């Protein structure tokens, strides 16, 4: 019942993959309020739009704000690696 961003991201990937979605775990730098540092989030492939959609379940759950495919996602997230 507790976890850090990596736990949120890997759980999201596992659930999405189990449902037949293509889901990546992404690691990089995240920034939220006073926090700035190593962070993990996801990208989900939309076959309808033929693109990867960024989603951050950790920031979404902790702030109540929308971190699903929003235009300014790149302002608070810098990707370093994905798998």
Image (spheres, rainbow, N blue to C red):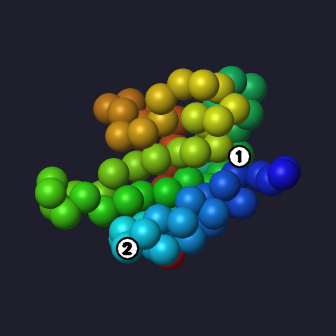
Q: Measuring from the top left, give residue 48's x and y in whole percent.
A: 15, 57
Residue at horizontal 60 percent and vertical 49 percent from the top: 29
Q: Residue 25: percent from the left, percent from the top?
A: 53, 66
Q: Residue at x 42, y 39 (%)?
A: 68
Element class at badge 2: loop
Mark 1: few/some/many CA within 10 Å (<14, 14-19, 20+): few
Residue 9 screen position, x and y as percent: 61, 59
In the image, 62: left or right of 75?
right
Which of the pair 76/70 is nearer the observer?
Answer: 70
Report helix, strand or loop for mark 1: strand
> Is residue 35 visible to the viewer in this orientation of the structure?
yes
Q: Is residue 63 left or right of residue 42?
A: right
Residue shown at the point (64%, 43%) measured from the top left:
58
| Residue behind mark 2 | 20
Q: Is tag 2's residue or tag 1's residue first in the polypeptide sequence?
A: 2
Residue denoted by label 1: 37
Q: Residues within 10 Å of mark 2 (few under 14, many from 20)?
A: few
Q: Is residue 54 positioned above or below 26 on the image?
A: above
Residue 81 seen in the figure: no
């Amino acid at each position: 019942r507790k976890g850090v961003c990596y736990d949120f991201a890997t759980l999201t990937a596992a659930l999405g993959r189990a449902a037949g979605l293509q889901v990546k775990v992404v690691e990089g730098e995240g920034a939220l309020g006073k926090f700035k540092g190593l962070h993990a989030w996801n990208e989900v492939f939309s076959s309808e739009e033929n693109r990867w959609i960024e989603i951050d379940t950790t920031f979404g759950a902790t702030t109540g704000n929308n971190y699903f495919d929003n235009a300014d996602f790149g302002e608070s997230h810098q990707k370093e690696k994905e798998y």
